[in-house]
Image (spheres, rainbow, N blue to C red):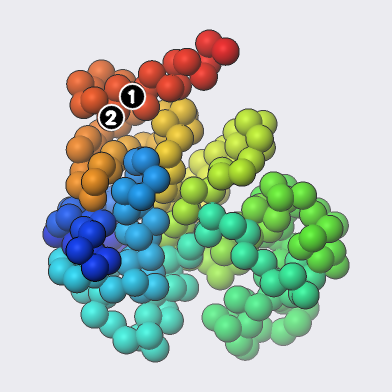
């Protein structure tokens, strides 16, 4: 099982957002993609799940090129590559259980209602949410909504989890809890995780490997320990922010 990005390019008008980037993912790896706002991090994830189409390059999933697939052909890819959006994106008018069941019904249409309920309970427990099935999203805190959104994504049993800025808008304690959850689920479910973020501290804490993007290009790549000794100006800037944050 592998995911490979080869020479991926994406522009909006005259602005080149991703400029022929290439990297691969190993099974079970937690890969952080770091960069300032507007460097193409989220655009990259949307290309992988087919919400955007690249102008050039390839996205290869298990030796199959997927970027040219039709919307219908992308359906099984989206089951395999679950995306956790920056905002919880839960249906306001549905209970938490119905939010989880919505995706399960699409991808596992032959299960009974009892099986959907059992699965919902199992995956909510995995993200440390209990007794919330009958609540509406607005009855939960923002952090709990984020976890419910994560439960909805893992309930369809993806092989890859793609996180778009998972800790945006969260306080430091909840941010740490979400990061621990990403690490825990990666190991527990044996999934491969791609985390788009601007938070170097989170990346140093849980990533197996880090890629740093700037102006649509990869400017640094390596393990957390390798990046700590990087001479790349943007990486040094990120590291400085971590040190300053820790000394406050």
Q: Count every numbered label the image shows and give the total.
A: 2
Residue name at image x 42 percent, y 31 percent: 200
The residue at the point 37 percent across, 80 percent down is 74
Task: Kindly identify the residue that appears in the image at 32 percent across and 59 percent down.
Answer: 44
Q: Residue 187: x percent and y percent?
A: 49, 45
Seen at 22% across and 35% down, the residue is 220
Q: Which residue corresponds to mark 1?
A: 237
Cα distance between the residues tagged 1 and 2: 5 Å
Residue in front for this viewpoint, 93 or 122: 93
Q: Nearer the viewer, residue 212 or 17?
A: 17
Residue 28 x %, y %: 39, 49
Disc 2 designates what residue?
Answer: 234
102 vs 56, left or right, is: right
Dot 2 lies on which element? helix
Residue 39, visible in the rendered structure: yes
Q: In which quarter of the image is the C terminus?
A: top right
Determine the image quadrant of residue 104. bottom right
* Label 1 with label 2: CB-CB less than 8 Å: yes
Q: In the rendered view, tell whether residue 40 sits above or below residue 200.
A: below
Q: In this view, does 201 lie above or below 38?
A: above
Q: Position of 159 compared to 148: left or right?
A: left
């Amino acid at each position: 099982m592998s995911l490979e990005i080869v020479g991926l390019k994406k522009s909006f008008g005259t602005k080149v957002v991703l400029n022929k980037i290439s990297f691969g993912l190993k099974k079970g790896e937690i890969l952080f993609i770091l960069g300032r706002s507007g460097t193409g991090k989220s655009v990259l994830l949307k290309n992988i799940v087919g919400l955007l189409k690249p102008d050039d390059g390839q996205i290869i999933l298990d030796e199959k090129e997927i970027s040219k697939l039709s919307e219908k052909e992308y359906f099984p890819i989206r089951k395999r590559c679950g995306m956790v959006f920056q905002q919880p994106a839960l249906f306001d008018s549905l209970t938490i259980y119905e939010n989880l069941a919505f995706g399960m019904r699409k991808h596992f249409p032959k299960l009974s209602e009892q099986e959907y309920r059992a699965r919902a309970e199992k995956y909510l427990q995995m993200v440390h949410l209990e007794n919330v099935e009958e609540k509406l999203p607005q009855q939960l805190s923002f952090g709990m909504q984020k976890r419910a959104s994560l439960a909805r994504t893992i309930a369809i049993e993806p092989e890859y989890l793609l996180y778009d800025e998972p800790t945006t808008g969260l306080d430091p304690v909840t941010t740490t809890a979400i990061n621990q959850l990403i690490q825990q689920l990666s190991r527990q479910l044996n999934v491969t995780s791609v985390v788009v973020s601007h938070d170097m501290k989170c990346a140093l804490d849980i990533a197996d490997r880090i890629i740093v993007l700037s102006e649509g290009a990869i400017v640094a790549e390596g393990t957390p320990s390798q990046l700590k000794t990087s001479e790349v100006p943007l990486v040094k800037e990120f590291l400085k922010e971590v040190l300053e944050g820790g000394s406050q």
